[in-house]
Image (cartoon, rainbow, N blue to C red):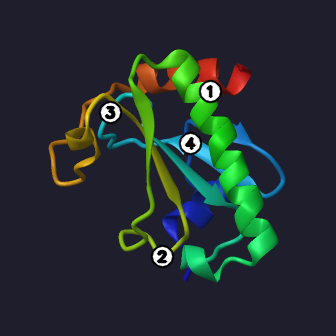
């Protein structure tokens, strides 16, 4: 069964894209820990990040690095935190989260409410960069 991320890649479910190439897609999380919380995924469905072929894995992290640079440029924060958990959706993904302190990476804390128009505007800004 296709994951929700595969449905996003296929266009069956919309997303707020911030970056894309032939292999990877980055989009804003609709239930973010912070404004700008972005998910980076391979377009090809792969469940476990450490099962990704080495060269693809390297390109995946280089793509995430490029997305993180966009986030740092446009979102006020001390750093872009990165997390790979891999349990919530059976499709490899990297969380890029603008943070100011370690506690900002706590996935059990309450999510930030960001209205859809604000997500759309932020995605446009980041995608255009």
In-front residue for pair 46/60: 60
- Disc with the residue nearer the chain's start (4 vs 3): 4
Instruction: Note whether 13 is above or below 79 in the view shown.
Output: below
Disc 2: which residue: 90
CA–CA distance between discs 2 and 3? 23 Å
- Disc with the residue nearer the chain's start (2 vs 3): 3
In-front residue for pair 52/116: 52
Quarter the N terminus occupies: bottom right
Instruction: Note whether 24 is above or below 73 in the view shown.
Output: below
CA–CA distance between discs 1 and 2? 26 Å
In-front residue for pair 40/103: 103
Residue 67, position in %: x, y? 63, 37
Disc 3: which residue: 34
Q: Quadrant of residue 54?
A: bottom right
Quarter the C terminus occupies: top right
CA–CA distance between discs 4 and 1? 12 Å
């Amino acid at each position: 069964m296709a994951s929700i991320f595969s449905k996003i890649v296929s266009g069956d479910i919309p997303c707020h894209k911030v970056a894309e190439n032939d292999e990877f897609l980055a989009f804003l999380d609709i239930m973010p820990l912070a404004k700008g919380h972005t998910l980076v995924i391979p377009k090809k469905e792969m469940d476990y990040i450490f099962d990704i072929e080495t060269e693809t894995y390297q390109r995946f992290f280089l793509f995430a690095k490029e997305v993180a640079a966009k986030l740092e440029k446009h979102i006020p924060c001390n750093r872009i935190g990165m997390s790979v958990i891999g349990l919530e959706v059976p499709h490899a993904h990297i969380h890029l989260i603008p943070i100011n302190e370690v506690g900002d990476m706590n996935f059990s804390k309450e999510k930030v409410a960001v209205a859809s128009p604000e997500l759309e505007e932020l995605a446009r800004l980041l995608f255009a960069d």
